[in-house]
Amino acid sequence: MKKITTIFMMSWALIANAQIDNLFPFNTSNQQIVQSAVKNAFVAITSSYRLQDPKTKKLYGRNGNDNFGTISSWGLKIDGGIVLPDQAVRPWEYDPNYSKYRDKYNTVPYQISFQKAEGKIVLDSIDVKVCNAQNLFYSIKDTLVANGEGFKIDSSDGEKDGWIIWLTEENDSINTFLVFKKKIEFKPNYNVYEVEQPNTIKKILAGIYVVPSYEAIGIVSFNLCGILVEQNEKWDLARISILPNETSNPSKVKVSPPVVQEDTDTELTLIESNKKKDKNKKDRK
């Protein structure tokens, strides 16, 4: 598998050895080098779901759509697969429209799509594994989206001298990065660490903590030590504890076939069995 690797100029190798205060942003060309090495690791994810009547097994969308709700999130390419946030696996838990139906209807995952530079890939089912002690993240084995490129995961304890990289949004369409130098002491059996949120007017979308691995003169690889997650209006750094190729009990998120019956709710839309998007195969758009 390819690693997140970049070749630096000798001047960068010298700067990397300099003493830099924690949370001091790289606003020079060096930041562009770090961004270039990691920017393709982020994958935009869209997850949709349907409601299901537990008694009749009827499936519903919302307001004429073939899904009840859609949630956007960000995933991360790792060696052998993709790390997904909880939003991608359980989108209904982040959709306010689901609240009034929670006690009456079950939820059924519909589709999950991955947007990358080469286009969109839509999957009807995925096998997920928990890869964080707090169930904040999941992982899937993948070659279609990750394309054999991704971070090696560093799960070792001890002090790390790396970078926090925030993915941000500017003007509702342009993704930018904020890069900060930071040392973190990783302790055994301690999986979540508080981090300082950057002072920015930009919308924060996601974030990671990476540590450089110097392989040769002028060649540096970045290993993933943690992923930033927003909890209770603040951001924490969560460690990754299970890799996709490790043995665990997978949970398949799969589309269920629709059942055609009468609908009595004006907001809910009955899923017709002849809709073209209802299929159990991979579809590349």
Image: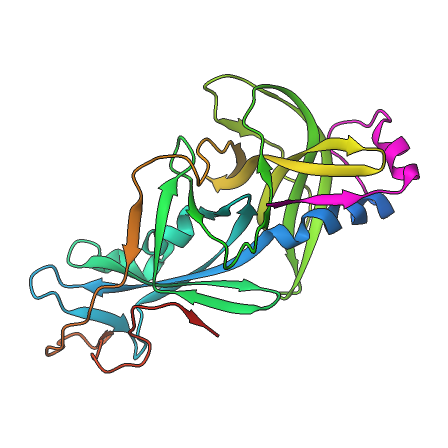
Q: Residue at x 52, y 38 (%)?
A: 234
Q: Say above or below: 255 vs 185.
A: below
Q: Position of residue 180 (x, y in %)?
A: 72, 37
Residue 50: quarter of image: bottom left
Q: Say above or below: 31 vs 116.
A: above
Q: Which residues are magenta?
A: 1-26
| Horizontal relation, residue 250 to residue 85: left or right | left
Q: Position of residue 90 (x, y in %)?
A: 34, 52
Q: Residue at x 32, y 62 (%)?
A: 97
Q: Position of residue 253 (x, y in %)?
A: 30, 54
Q: Nearer the viewer, residue 19 or 252?
A: 252
Q: Residue at x 63, y 66 (%)?
A: 173
Residue 104: quarter of image: bottom left
Q: Is residue 203 visible?
A: no
Q: Is residue 92 magenta?
A: no
Residue 228: quarter of image: top right
| Horizontal relation, residue 237 to residue 106: left or right | right
Q: Is residue 4 magenta?
A: yes
Q: Say above or below: 118 vs 263.
A: above
Farthest-out residue, front: 1
Q: Position of residue 78 (x, y in %)?
A: 55, 44
Q: Nearer the viewer, residue 142 or 199?
A: 142
